Image (tube, rainbow, N blue to C red):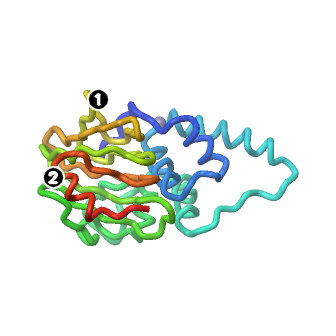
Amino acid sequence: MDFSMAQAHPNKEHLAAYASGAQSEGMSLLVASHLTYCPTCRAAVEQYEAVSAAIMFGEAPVTADGPSLEACFAALSEPAPQAPTVSSAPSPLPMPIRQVLNHRNVDELNWKFRMPGLLEVEFDDFEGEHVSLLRVRPGTGMLHHTHEGEEATLILTGEMEDQGNVFRSGDVALADHNDNHKPRVIGDELCYCLIVMTGSMRFTGPVGRALNLFTRTQ
Ligand SMILES: [Zn+2]
């Protein structure tokens, strides 16, 4: 796995909300996963945590509800992932995501066909957010779409190009309703990425408009 330094990060609001325990579960999963790649954001989160702790001084510690979020935080304090005993192949996924998936191998997941070259596994347990894992073949362009809410994409493997920017392992691409974009997987490596969407996504191309009929809205 490539643990090269991430170039694109969650924004300050995401990190601060995560550190204070106020972040939604889906975005918390994304941030926790990004932190496994990014010492810069780990340091920022530690600072926010120190500030939150100071503000909360004397009060009971905030507890996260829901096993997924707890799993995220637990994963952070764990040492770098070692070869798991249950699977011989190295996982392309960081530990927080593996824990949400109960350590299933990527080939054991319930992949759904979305379009040629693009498969998706949706995570069910994130209320109010659309959280999913994509497996995208190089050369595959995703459909033009815009957002009612916010979309965050964490690249796990491979390379994605979007509006002239290239995102690699550990990078976070953020998009909101001002963006009408068409990300594309480039290079020659299979791209796994984690997508967290708040609000709904709207396809804008001619084929995409038909697909809107099939996509779920929040
Ligand atoms: Zn970062």
Q: In this view, does 82 lie above or below 66?
A: above
Q: How many labels does the image show?
A: 2
Q: What SS does tag 2 mark?
A: helix
Label 1 belongs to which residue?
165
**Residue at point 12% right, 43% down?**
139
Task: Residue 122: name its quadrant.
Answer: bottom left
The spot of residue 135 in percent (x, y) is 23, 56
Q: Nearer the viewer, residue 11 or 73?
A: 11
Quarter in which the C terminus is drawn:
bottom left
The spot of residue 102 in percent (x, y) is 41, 71
Q: Which of 113 and 52 is in front in this view?
A: 113
Q: Distance between the residues labelled 2 and 1?
A: 25 Å
Horizontal side, residue 66 vs residue 208: left or right = right
Horizontal side, residue 174 vs residue 156: left or right = right
**Residue at point 39% right, 33% down?**
5
Task: Residue 70: name its quadrant.
Answer: bottom right
Sequence-earlier tag: 2 or 1 = 1
Q: Nearer the viewer, residue 125 or 216?
A: 216
User: In the image, what residue type sits under mark 1?
Assistant: Asn
Q: Which of 218 and 115 is in front in this view?
A: 218
Q: Looking at the image, which residue sits at the far top?
A: 164
Q: In this view, does 158 lie above or below 40?
A: below
**Residue at point 70% right, 62% down?**
63
Label 2 belongs to which residue?
207
